[in-house]
Amino acid sequence: MKKFFAQAYIWLLLAILYAPILIIVIFSFTEAKVLGNWTGFSTKLYTSLFSGSVQHSLIDAIQNTLIIALIAAAVSTILGSIAAIGIYSLKGRKKMAINTLNNIPMLNPDIITGISLFLLFVSFGVTQGYATVILAHITFCTPYVVLSVMPRLQQMNPNLYEAALDLGATPGQALRKVLIPEIKPGMISGFILAFTLSIDDFAVTIFNIGTSGLETLSTYIYADARKGGLTPELRPLSTIIFVTVLILLIIINVRSQRAAKKKEVL
Amino acid sequence: MNESNFIIELKHISKSFGDKVVLDDVSLFVEQGEFVTILGPSGCGKTTLLRILAGFGMADEGEIRIEGKEITDTPPHLRPLNTVFQRYALFPHLNVYDNVAFGLKLKGVKKDEIDERVNKALKMVGMTDYEWRDVNSLSGGQQQRVAIARAIINRPKVLLLDEPLAALDLKMRKDMQMELKQMHKTLGITFVYVTHDQEEALTLSDRIVVMNEGKVQQIGTPTDIYNEPVNSFVADFIGESNIMNGTMIKDKLVSFMGNECECVDVGFGENVPVDVVLRPEDLILSAKTEGFPFQGTVQSCIFKGVHYEMIITTTTGYEIIAQNYKPFEVGTLIGIDIEPSNIQVMKKERLFNTFEGEMIDSTHVKMLGDEFVCNAVPNVEGGEKVTVKVDFDKVDLQDNKEDGTIVGSVHFILYKCDRYHLTVHTEDGENIYVDTHDVWDDCDIVGVRIDPDDIQITLE
């Protein structure tokens, strides 16, 4: 009996968590304009999403989102990895201080990050647009990359880098041939994390996107919803994004599990 | 080449981390083809010395030369030596072949030659047919073999080994010791080996460098170090030994354990306090007591495979350890003798504690970072620099650190057959040497008290 309640509780919790997403997924397979009406199974919304019958601005928004996410993720992966190596080689109090400084931006509410970046750009007279959004995304993604690369460095045998130098590698070669291959899994996880964070972001983006008409997916949906009623094609789009994120998350988890197993063998 | 025959010259190397002096004026010269072991307890600076030699750490002071060429400031990748690390440090993302070939590939050696040399190196360490294996799938011993192959393939002038066998189990360690010794012979490369295992050091080395607290204690062949330790630290660290206080009466006559014995040592002077070392296997035991210089009662007798190990209390109150092929029953009184040549006499490093101090007023002296009450010193106003002398047995250690004037931690315990000789580290980094009958453990925190009567002050 006790077990039954425990199980039921878990399922109830999962149902509450996933109900909103499930509703979107289910209603993406019907044609009804208003969310909540079921007019029979159809994949028409999916075809119209890709056939270009939707407004051009939605496609633009998707494109912008992906480009921004790719650039932001790539740059923050590089910056974050370099920072992680730097922090790793620090010692004692300094290391702790920098680690804490790295963690604060992650705990900082997005809205504060957004406003402060907005003020920064304004005070430097930077015109808001593509560049400011990318810079903003790099800013909040980098600490996450540091956080995912750090454990790889800490698990690493501290003599590896020295062993490479000992065998005649210059510091640069040791970095390329030994250190980077060692932290690569962390870098990839960091990249994926940064990518999803960037796609997902609304609060920081809205403050830094400017007024030139640039839209990302999140700002587009927001504007669309405020105009009254969501464009029906957003349902299949949400479904696709959800599934993509799900797959990425599964990849990250499988990777980290495999890494853990490999460690156990050692 | 140059005028010196030494392949490695370390001259006056000093190194500190913060306030802590890790290496204090260490000099070492190694000849071409030698197997030199740096031996010492953990924290004695041996690994730091090796890292400075490899170039992973820089010395604060001193000079390093290899084949006469100065390399003090040369970065590690340009030094003609290779290292085998304690935890192997194989590159996990590369297989055995690529690990071993790492150095040659960097040098741009041709593929055919790399193939040939990798095969040869793997054959040398008995790892043929493992080329394509993932290094993570290998056992500890196999990984260490690959690590050795990876180092020797570069034909270094010197091979540095940092406790390479410490992570292996006993059986594997013994096998690898023999193989390393064989490899050293075949390759003709100079080996510098770091270990805390005295048995390993005695087995492998041509010469041993015993280190403690950042200083070289003794350099010599294994037999020298074992038979003629220069101080009580070396005698205690290498092998089992009975170390006790004695007095050199005159040349070739020493008194210890309540009797005078003939010995072979000369040149200490007359009536000089010394340390006497007796190796357990050198003691001659007999059921007869008559005519023997010492008598004692057997306290315990344990079979150790080849010999029996006995703890014997002498009639004069000393507790000694002895090894014998024949057992004696517990409780029997036996006679003990020793050959004159087996009595090792050592000069004492110090006879009493000396501290630098400063008078506060005529009855208070500041030393060891705190104020001590002393007997009134005449004509003192305060501020005078003084030297304070305290006998070893006049330092009083207290369980509760609150009961002492200052706090210290027990650091090195030497059993001297009728007493313990302790080294106590004070909080501001000075050493107090204490003779006591109480049992203390390493790292015990103690309160240190000194009776005013026992503080002997000399004005400078």
Image (cartoon, coloured by chain):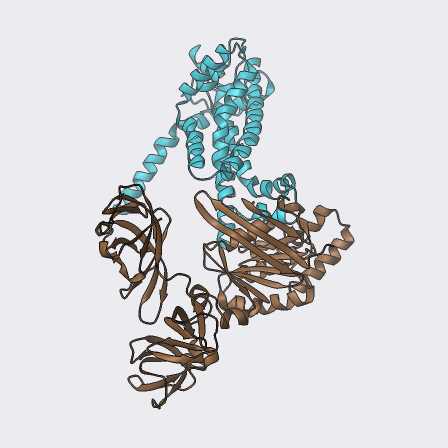
Name the colour assigned to chain B in the rendering.
Answer: brown
Q: Vertically, is B293 above or below A36?
A: below
Is B267 or A113 nearer to us in this picture? B267
Q: Looking at the rendering, in which quadrant would you find the N terminus of chain B?
A: bottom right
Residue at the image position 27 percent from the left and 60 percent from the top:
B394
Name the colour assigned to chain A in the rendering.
Answer: cyan
Is B257 or A241 nearer to us in this picture? B257
Residue at the image position 46 percent from the left and 39 percent from the top:
A91
Q: Is residue B9 visible?
A: yes
Q: Vertically, is B377 above or below B32?
A: above
Tell me residue A26's x, y (percent): 44, 28
Q: Is residue A233 visible?
A: no
Tell whether B131 sits left or right of B243.
Answer: right
Tell me residue B415's x, y (percent): 35, 67
Tell me residue B402's x, y (percent): 22, 49
Tell me residue B213's x, y (percent): 45, 55
Tell whether A171 sits left or right of A146.
Answer: right
Q: Vertically, is B126 above or below B4?
A: below
Tell whether B59 sits left or right of B330.
Answer: right
**Residue B254, quarter of picture:** bottom left
Is B302 or A36 nearer to us in this picture? B302
Is A202 or B283 nearer to us in this picture? B283
Q: Vertically, is B356 above or below B294?
A: above
